[in-house]
Amino acid sequence: MKKLSLAALLLVAATVLGATVLREPVADAATAVLQSNIVGPLDGNGNVKVHEQGTASVQGTVSSRPAAPGSTWFASELVHYSSDVPLAGPTSTAINITSLTASTLPTEPADLYLDAYTEPGSADTCDTVPREDYFAYNAYVVQHVTEPFSVAFPTPLRLKAPEGKKVCLVARTYDGLFVSASGFFDD
């Protein structure tokens, strides 16, 4: 209580002092700044010279907000009993995951695994079996799904294959789930 009253007293004293005793020195200092006269370097019209002159040149795109992704993807699949179900790919660009939704079948709780593996650069499907080149095994795992859930990734989960390869995103479970995922492709 004493600290509060001391702080209030100091605040009142500073206000009174600033409004009365120090009013003229502060006003005089502000006036001196406003009345300054720049003597050089000046150009022929009396304006202050600056180093860079002319029109600014900008290369590239100038934007105040991010552009929408050029190529989006969406998948909604029944993932069941030890099967890998492709969600996106194969692509040589990065797979960005922005949202994921899953709900269980009426049997029992389930675990959801998202995996990424590579295919040869010439692949046009994600069907290579056996899959030996997982580079993001268990990239995202949700354990014991008992009720529908949804998650958004403000910073996308990004999966990109090495040079000369393509990436596939698959969902896997040992039970049964309905899985929906979406995102976009980029370099």
Image (cartoon, rainbow, N blue to C red):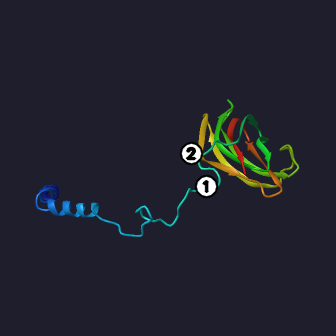
Question: Mark number for residue 58?
Answer: 1
Q: Where's residue 155, x and y in %?
A: 60, 49
Q: Where's residue 85, x and y in %?
A: 78, 40
Neighbours of disc 2 within 10 Å: few (<14), some (14-19), many (20+): few
Q: Where's residue 163, x and y in %?
A: 80, 58
Residue visible at 64% across and 44% down in the picture: 142
Amino acid type at circle 1 is Val
Q: Quadrant of residue 33?
A: bottom left
Amino acid type at circle 2 is Arg
**Viewport quadrant of the N terminus:** bottom left
Of label 2 and label 1, which has the lower sequence position? 1
Q: Cα distance, mark 2 to mark 1?
A: 17 Å
Residue visible at 27% across and 62% down in the picture: 35
Image side of residue 174 versus residue 15, left or right: right
Q: Residue furthest bottom?
A: 40
Q: Residue furthest top?
A: 106
Image side of residue 131 versus residue 104, left or right: right
Q: Which residue is mark 2?
A: 65
Neighbours of disc 1 within 10 Å: few (<14), some (14-19), many (20+): few
Image side of residue 53 versus residue 129, left or right: left
Q: Secondary structure at mark 2?
A: loop
Image side of residue 46 versus residue 33, left or right: right
Question: Mark number for residue 128?
Answer: none
Q: Quadrant of residue 3?
A: bottom left
Say if 50 sits above or below 171 in the image. Answer: below
Which is nearer the eye, 155 or 80?
A: 155
Q: Secondary structure at mark 1?
A: loop
Q: Quadrant of residue 83?
A: top right
Q: Where's residue 180, x and y in %?
A: 68, 36
